[in-house]
Amino acid sequence: MRKNLSILTLLLCATACIYPYTPELDEAPEGVLAVDANISIGDVSTVRLSALRSIWPSEQSFYPDFHDAAVWVEDETGVSYPGTPTPQYFGYYDFYLPGVALFTIPTENAPADRRYRLCVDALGAKYVSDWTDIAAPPVIREINFSADEERVSVNVSVDAGAEATGYFLLSFDETWEFHADYTPSYIVSVIPGVIPGTDHVSIVEDSPDYSKYWCWNSSDNHQLFPVDYTAMSDSGITSWPIFRFSRKDSRNHKRYCVNIKARTLSKETYRFLKNLENNTTGGDNLFTPTPGEIAGNLRCESDPERTVLGYVLFSRTTSKRAWLDSRYLRISRPHTLLYPTEEHFLEYYNNGYLPLEELVPELREEGKGPYGWGPRYCYDCTAAGGTQEKPDFWDDAE
């Protein structure tokens, strides 16, 4: 009996401090503008506009229209930097998300010794941020690479610089040279009215064909990493692992370049970004802040009573590149090929497949053809998302 009472007491204590968060969905403020802005002096700035909408659409649901929206950055001397609408990238296609607008602003050459603010004209109102001084960036001292059995780690060392606050913001983009899984070694002769068979498959002249074998790929996931180094002994961070990737990844095929960017943050901005991070990735932690605790730094200039959500991050960017060759490459199996019989050759050929390898008779299986066929991205690196246009900054040194 005492044991049961003890267990019951523990359960009551464990649940006593949990308060469910129940939003008043009937009073949800549809149509409120939400702004996600990264104003980076010395780099390209980005601003994303959206608006609150009900998760249960109805005839009265609000569908924001940003076709006439305007976004710009201005400095205290009156110089303006207008934003340009930019399509979102998804797969191999560019498209515009309904109810969302992304703008890029050319602030690469904006002077660092001025104050700036963001202006947004959208949904029939004008919104502005406060004038903000731009803090000097930290110093990226070193970028190095390490690896275990499965993954490569990209590590960065950063010094606080002249205006140490105890907080950094890190981000990165990547570029790498990679190759397709196969080279086209066979051609198919298609004769009108005749289904091609093994007699119509022949070796490519000057085989193998490397014309679409090597490409460059790039990635910028726009992920931000707020770092608090106030508890560390040094004024900065040393060999901090910013991200990892698989040793079997195409980043290891030949040559890889990472471009790391660092910015100084104020304590208030760090807290906002960390709270936002906890809200999106913190799950149901008891100490995760509720959405109402995240305050923005925008206001509606044309109507002070109008609500606006979001935060404008102002910073000055410094960057540094590092290069990695194929030393950590672990060979992985290429894409699995298909072995159709002759009556299916034309169907495969018309869908972009090509025969890429031939099995010797003793290795052929019953019900399968003699050639292994693969889709275009197996033998054409441009179909795998790459480009054969060499980046301007690319360094071929091994």
Image (cartoon, grey):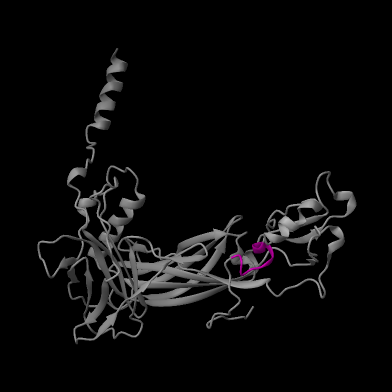
Residue most extreme to the right: 362
User: Dividing the picture into quarters, in which one does residue 150 lie?
Assistant: bottom right
Find out whether residue 382 is within the magenta segment: yes
Find out whether residue 390 is within the magenta segment: no
Q: Is residue 348 left or right of residue 157?
A: right
Q: Position of residue 252 (x, y in %)?
A: 61, 66
The vertical placement of 281 against 352, above or below, is: above
Q: Nearer the viewer, residue 279 or 11?
A: 279
Quadrant of the frame with the C terminus: bottom right
Q: Nearer the viewer, residue 86 or 177?
A: 86
The vertical placement of 103 against 290, above or below, is: below
Q: Nearer the viewer, residue 383 or 254?
A: 383
Residue at position x 31%, y 22% from top?
Answer: 7
Q: Is residue 227 left or right of residue 30?
A: right
Q: Position of residue 166 (x, y in %)?
A: 29, 67
Q: Is residue 126 visible?
A: yes
Residue at position x 72%, y 54% from top?
Answer: 337
Residue most extreme to the front: 193
Quadrant of the frame with the N terminus: top left
Q: Is residue 24 visible?
A: no
Residue at position x 76%, y 52% from top?
Answer: 344
Q: Position of residue 243 (x, y in %)?
A: 48, 61
User: Dividing the picture into quarters, in which one does residue 44 lie?
Assistant: bottom left
The residue segment tinted magenta is 376-384
